[in-house]
Amino acid sequence: MAYSGPFEAGDRVQLTDQKRRHHTIVLEPGESYFTHKGEIRHDDIIGANEGSVVESTLGEEYLCFRHLMVDHVLSMPRGAAVIYPKDTAQILVEGDIFPGARVLEAGAGSGALSMALLRAIGPTGKLISYEIRDDHLEFARSNVAEYFGHEPEQWDPRLGDLSEVHLDDIDGPVDRIILDMVEPWTCIDNVSELLRPGGVFMTYVPTVPQLMNIMEHIRDQKCFTEPRAWETLLREWRVEGLATRPEHRMNAHTAFLVWARRLADGVTPPRPKRRARK
């Protein structure tokens, strides 16, 4: 599957009609896609440049582009809810996911975050993904393989519980750990063992009780910096001259992100000073 250049057989293509409705097809020579607006021949798309317009047999026009990662994430089959792109972007930047990094994630779900992490670490990195449910792991493996065209060599998906994982199981400490699970605080001892000093620990939790619980467990562990927590709200704008205004719908709360860094062994973190009450 190519990422740029003229369309090729095997490319996943998004067709957009005049009402901005999307249709996704995988190009195969000699095949056709049928809509209520007529037949679209794959051969009319193969060899054309991205951004071309194809016409159905009934004269309906469709704009053709390859699937971006965000398109794939929001349209792919899922067993568990996916981490939305707005949160994935925060994880990649705040978590400082770098090429060649060794990353451990638990709660692979449907594989949305796994795909972004695999692209960020590159072929020299390593991603170990734990999932406790075999049906979710199958969704993750299928979605990742469908996006990349194969299962990346730097990916190690595993069925198992992170609370039972130790250093020998993953061939030494990792640079980054990201958790997306119901009770991440049950694995905080394992995170402390598996994460190298200076490494970044992030977790994704939807509710306030979960947020309070994981924050207190991180503090009680006494081997992390003072944790930070935030949420990201995304609102698009409709820009039409003097009628410019925010859209009525927005991607508001999906989850809280919690961030902390591993201290060196034996170090006592400085106690944070809070502003005195007047």
Image (cartoon, grey):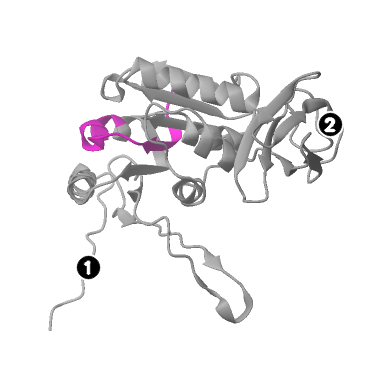
Element carrying mark 2: helix
Q: Is residue 10 visible?
A: no
User: 96 and 34: which one is in front?
Assistant: 34
Could you say which quadrant of the image residue 29 lies in? top right
**Can you tell which mark lies on residue 44?**
2
Q: Quadrant of the C terminus?
A: bottom left
Residue assigned mark 1:
273
In this image, 176 relative to 185: left or right? right
Residue 185 lies in the magenta stretch? yes
Residue at left 63%, top 26%? 148
User: 276 and 236: which one is in front?
Assistant: 236
User: Measured along the vertical axis of the image, is residue 77 above or below residue 271?
Assistant: above
First to last magenta residue range: 170-190
Residue at left 59%, top 19%? 151
Residue at left 53%, top 42%? 97
- Three-letter residue code for mark 2: Asp
